Image (tube, rainbow, N blue to C red):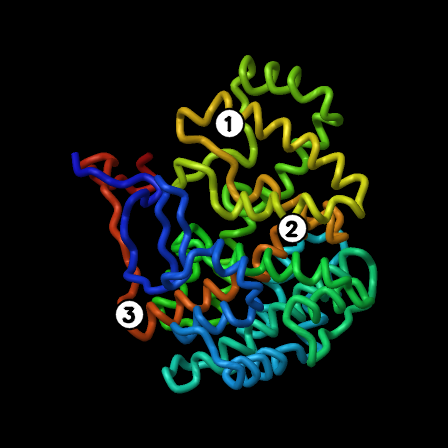
């Protein structure tokens, strides 16, 4: 029988200049730059968004012009906001993002063009900020606020979401989170979007496809699930008994541990943990979750590290979002993931359509019955 690769594991879908991963050594690079070095530099997320779309880091003028293009996307048509607010506020946050981008796909003319793709991409990144802020406020029963031009991408988003000026610590943490989640090669959501745009469907439809894949609990939702796991434990003094009963004896999955690519500590998880250490001081509930998570981490590594199973990026990211002030509600942490990942999605779309375009049309290995005679319905 012909062989297939279940889940397309180890199948190379495209060439890319965007992201490289060494899963054995735990190294993640964006266009040749180690993610740790990017974070240490204090770079704005807009600089890395520019890197993904243009292949090089911007100078000051290029960054200023790029930020202006992003800010053009902050203004959304009323019907896009209505696509969010007309739905119940107990709706899934990622589905609300999908609805907003589907509205754009229905109404904004788009044709792939190397001369304009990146200008449109910058505006779409701005669209995602405005959409995500509106989604967050809607699920809390609040009127949407438009992100303001002038501030950084992270600052403008937080101000539109919370309706007040964020602290510099919050801005820096959000900026870092946006960089860390920006891209990770071709996981399910990126692959889904690539299948869509390989038909030359518009960029907005590609994002809808990516969001639909992200909505599934095997891809998105891990940050929420990790927090839910810590909530279930309840207190750091109960971690050891819980771990023995559920993970050692019960053989349940330890949420936030393990990765299809990494066989060591996910470098993004280390950075998220370092951010959480500083942020939890202002949030007692997040501090409680962090103490539980830290003990779970110790036990997880002690019992699973020899098998190449370590914390992944979602293990601590939910605690960072909680510390920033986002409640565990309506899948909002996954929507925040999408706010960051939209740049990676679009960059992959552009790279594929402009440089490697071919309709993605795989085959299947048939395993059903051989020849059968068809019997009319009145003879069955």
Judge from the rendering whether residue 198 lies leftward or rightward of residue 189; answer left or right. left
- The crowd level at tag 3 (other Cα within 10 Å; few <14, some 14-19, many 20+) is some
Which quadrant holds residue 40? Answer: bottom right
Residue at the image point whose x is 66% and y is 61% from the top: 172
| Vertical arrangement, residue 44 with respect to residue 119, above or below | above
* C-alpha span from label 2 to label 1: 25 Å
List x then y, in percent, for residue 294.
Answer: 63, 32
**Label ID, residue 162:** none
* C-alpha span from label 3 to label 1: 42 Å
Q: Which element carries disc 1, helix, strand or loop?
A: helix
Q: Earlier in the sequence, mark 3 or mark 1?
A: 1
Residue at the image point whose x is 77% and y is 52% from the top: 325
The residue to which callout 2 is attached is 333
Which quadrant holds residue 8? Answer: top left
Q: Which of marks 3 and 2 is nearer the N terminus?
A: 2
The residue to which callout 1 is attached is 301
Q: Do the residues labelled 3 and 2 touch (CB within 8 Å)?
A: no
Q: Nearer the viewer, residue 380 or 307?
A: 307
Judge from the rendering whether residue 138 lies leftward or rightward of residue 31; answer left or right. right
Q: Which of 246 and 365 is in front in this view?
A: 246
The residue to which callout 3 is attached is 357
Q: Are marks 2 and 1 in contact (CB under 8 Å)?
A: no
Judge from the rendering whether residue 303 lies leftward or rightward of residue 163; answer left or right. left
Q: Do the residues labelled 3 and 1 touch (CB within 8 Å)?
A: no
* C-alpha span from label 3 to label 2: 33 Å
Q: Earlier in the sequence, mark 2 or mark 1?
A: 1
Q: Which element carries disc 2, helix, strand or loop?
A: helix
- The crowd level at tag 2 (other Cα within 10 Å; few <14, some 14-19, many 20+) is many
List x then y, in percent, for residue 5.
Answer: 27, 41
List x then y, in percent, for residue 335.
Answer: 62, 56
């Amino acid at each position: 029988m012909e062989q297939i690769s279940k889940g397309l594991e180890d199948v190379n879908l495209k060439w890319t200049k965007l992201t490289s991963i060494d899963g054995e050594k735990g190294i993640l690079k964006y266009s040749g730059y180690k993610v740790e070095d990017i974070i240490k530099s204090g770079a704005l997320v807009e600089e890395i968004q520019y890197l993904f779309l243009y292949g090089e880091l911007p100078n000051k003028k290029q960054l200023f012009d790029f930020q202006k293009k992003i800010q053009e996307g902050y203004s959304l048509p009323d019907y896009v906001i209505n696509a969010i607010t007309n739905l119940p506020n107990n709706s899934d946050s990622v589905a609300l993002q999908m609805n907003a981008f589907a509205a754009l796909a229905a109404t904004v003319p788009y044709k792939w063009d190397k001369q304009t793709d990146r200008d449109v991409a910058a505006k779409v990144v701005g669209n995602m900020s405005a959409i995500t802020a509106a989604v967050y406020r809607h699920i809390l029963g609040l009127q949407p606020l438009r992100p303001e031009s002038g501030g950084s991408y992270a600052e403008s988003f937080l101000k539109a979401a919370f309706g007040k000026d964020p602290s510099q610590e919050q801005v820096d943490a959000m900026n870092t989170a946006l960089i860390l989640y920006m891209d990770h090669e071709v996981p399910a959501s990126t692959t889904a979007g690539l299948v869509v745009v390989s038909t030359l469907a518009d960029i907005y439809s590609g994002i809808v496809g990516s969001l639909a894949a992200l909505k599934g609990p095997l891809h998105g939702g891990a940050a929420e699930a990790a927090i839910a796991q810590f909530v279930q434990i309840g207190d750091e003094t109960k971690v050891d008994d819980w771990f023995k009963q559920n993970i050692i004896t019960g053989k349940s999955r330890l949420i936030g541990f393990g990765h299809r690519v990494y066989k060591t500590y996910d470098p993004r998880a280390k950075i998220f943990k370092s951010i959480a250490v500083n942020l939890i001081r202002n949030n007692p509930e997040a501090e409680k979750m962090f103490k539980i998570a830290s003990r779970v981490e110790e036990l997880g590594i002690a019992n699973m590290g020899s098998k190449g199973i370590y914390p992944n990026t979602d293990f601590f990211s939910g605690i960072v979002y909680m510390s920033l002030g986002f409640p565990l509600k309506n899948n909002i942490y996954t929507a925040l993931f999408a706010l960051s990942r939209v740049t990676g999605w679009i960059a992959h779309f552009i790279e594929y359509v402009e440089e490697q375009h071919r309709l993605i049309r795989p085959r299947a290995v048939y395993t059903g019955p051989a020849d059968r005679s068809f019997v009319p319905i009145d003879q069955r």
